[in-house]
Image (cartoon, coloured by chain):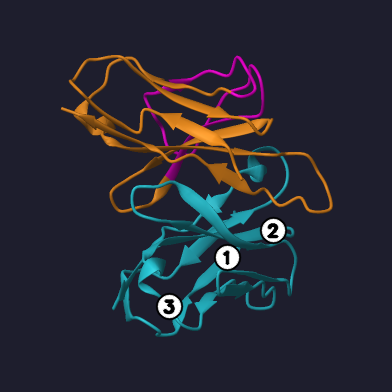
Amino acid sequence: EADIYQTPRYLVIGTGKKITLECSQTMGHDKMYWYQQDPGMELHLIHYSYGVNSTEKGDLSSESTVSRIRTEHFPLTLESARPSHTSQYLCASSDEREAPSFSNEQFFGPGTRLTVL
Amino acid sequence: GNSVTQMEGPVTLSEEAFLTINCTYTATGYPSLFWYVQYPGEGLQLLLKATKADDKGSNKGFEATYRKETTSFHLEKGSVQVSDSAVYFCALGTYGGSQGNLIFGKGTKLSVKP
């Protein structure tokens, strides 16, 4: 059973507020990801991390920032939320060790649905 | 570069109908291939995977075969149920660095009517 958690599940806030979306995993995975999912369902990678103190920008430019101080924790922060940030945010993790069964499989959290008014 | 092309939806079927969702890919090297499913209000769950050519992934009555000659990984189920209503994503992954990130198709929404 994959154990990756996201809080809050739902968040409604006003424009200009600072928010942090939490993501934690208990599988000891080195690699973690943040995706933004638009209403049309398509997934867009916005950030990823190879491990502690590593953060990389994804394929879609985002005004959010991330940090990776602990292996298990990968929070995403928006300094000043805007209505254009309204979306579903999904966190995921994967085990990057090479093995006979290596397969890049990613494990996803339940998501945070953010609405900015 | 690597890419995944997935059948556009939405797909609407009656219960017990046969399902096929097409997925083709472009990749250098030898990718792993995945089908993920997303039920309403949830994150993605791995449905099945295949790591080399001619492998067949299967789970919950769903199957997909890794076809290198046609660069395809089509998802099939012989008899769908209402509970299969969800969004299905085909994905590709190769090892190492940013290439280790998965590339997802755009998703296909399936609705199964009783």
Compared with B16, A26 (above or below) is above
Which chain is depicted cyan?
B
Compared with B20, A39 (above or below) is above
Please indicate, yes or no, whether residue A38 appears anywhere in the rendered image: yes
Q: Is residue A64 left or right of residue B24?
A: left
Dot 1 or dot 3: first in sequence order is: 1
Chain A shown in which color? Answer: orange
Image point (35%, 33%), residue name: A9
**Crowd class of label 2 (few under 14; some 14 to 19; many from 20; radius 10 Å):** many
Q: Secondary structure at mark 1?
A: strand
Residue bearing mark 2: B31
**Crowd class of label 3 (few under 14; some 14 to 19; many from 20; radius 10 Å):** many
Residue bearing mark 3: B80
Query: For the residues tagged 2 and 1, is the chain the same?
Result: yes
Residue type (three-letter) at the residue carrying disc 3: Val
Residue bearing mark 1: B25
Q: Which residues, given as a range, are shown in magenta?
A: A44-72
The residue positioned farthest toward the right in the image shown? A100
Residue type (three-letter) at the residue carrying disc 1: Tyr
Image point (72%, 39%), residue name: A96
Q: Name the chain under label 2.
A: B
Q: CA distance from mark 3 to mark 2?
A: 28 Å
**Crowd class of label 1 (few under 14; some 14 to 19; many from 20; radius 10 Å):** many
